[in-house]
Image (cartoon, rainbow, N blue to C red):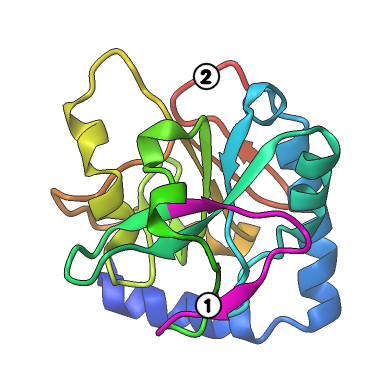
């Protein structure tokens, strides 16, 4: 089994080598696959992300959410030294600022943001995944710390967590860490992996 660092390096390189046309074509297919799930259809408060480092572009899905009167949120880095994400509502005309990782965030006062447990669905970026719902991120741990409370939940699994990736980001098995928060499902341009056997 390859190390997490090796997997991260290899897949990030492959993702960065996609042409923009290839990335956009696959992104449209991913958006269509997400849009056809019950999770998306019946969720009102959804968190997505702005693509970075060659990640899928969720713009088509974000625009569909707006047309369907859903509230779309983007992650923002919270208070200093907390190292967790908050989620800010985002609309088409809203201003964005670049955070310390070079990713756009809505300009939203912290008291107007929400914690992850106030969302119905979180669409999560990732570097690699496996068929068991394990996710490898960029290595900063923001999503795992933010969603750590789900480890203590037994019957109420809100928000639902759906990874969004290209099919080539799937690996046979990811090395796990105790703090990893597993995904409920993963959507690629080719497949929907229903890990938790939900009504997708």
Q: Which residues are magenta?
A: 87-100
Q: Residues within 10 Å of mark 1 (few under 14, many from 20)?
A: some
Q: Residues within 10 Å of mark 2 (few under 14, many from 20)?
A: few
Image-based side of 62 in relation to 159, left or right: right
Residue 187 figure quarter:
top right
Mark-to-mark CA distance, 2 and 1: 31 Å
Magenta stretch: residue 123 in it?
A: no
Tag of residue 4: none
**Above or below 112: residue 11:** below
Tag of residue 103: 1
The residue tagged 2 is 198
**Above or below 95: residue 165:** above
Magenta stretch: residue 92 in it?
A: yes
Number of disc labels: 2
Mark before the other along the chain sequence, 2 or 1: 1
Image quarter (top left, top right, bottom left or bottom right) of the N terminus: bottom left
Image-based side of 15 in relation to 33, left or right: left
**Above or below 77: residue 39:** above
Q: Position of residue 149 (x, y in %)?
A: 22, 36
Q: Position of residue 188 (x, y in %)?
A: 66, 50
């Amino acid at each position: 089994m390859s190390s997490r660092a090796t997997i991260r390096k290899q897949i990030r390189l492959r993702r960065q080598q996609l042409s923009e046309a290839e990335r956009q074509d696959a992104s449209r297919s991913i958006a269509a696959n997400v849009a056809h799930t019950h999770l998306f259809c019946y969720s009102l408060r959804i968190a997505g992300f702005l693509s970075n480092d060659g990640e899928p572009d969720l713009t088509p899905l974000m625009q569909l959410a707006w047309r369907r009167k859903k509230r779309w949120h983007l992650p923002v880095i919270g208070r200093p030294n907390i190292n967790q994400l908050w989620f800010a509502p985002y609309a088409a005309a809203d201003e964005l600022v670049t955070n310390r990782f070079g990713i756009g965030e809505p300009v939203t006062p912290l008291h107007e943001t929400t914690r992850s447990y106030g969302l119905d669905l979180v669409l999560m970026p990732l570097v690699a995944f496996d068929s068991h719902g394990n996710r490898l991120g960029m290595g900063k741990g923001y999503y795992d710390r933010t969603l750590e409370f789900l480890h203590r939940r037994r019957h109420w699994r809100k928000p639902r967590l759906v990874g969004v990736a290209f099919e080539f980001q799937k690996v046979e098995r990811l090395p796990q860490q105790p703090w990893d928060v597993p995904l409920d499902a993963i959507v690629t341009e080719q497949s929907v992996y229903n890990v938790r056997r939900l009504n997708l």
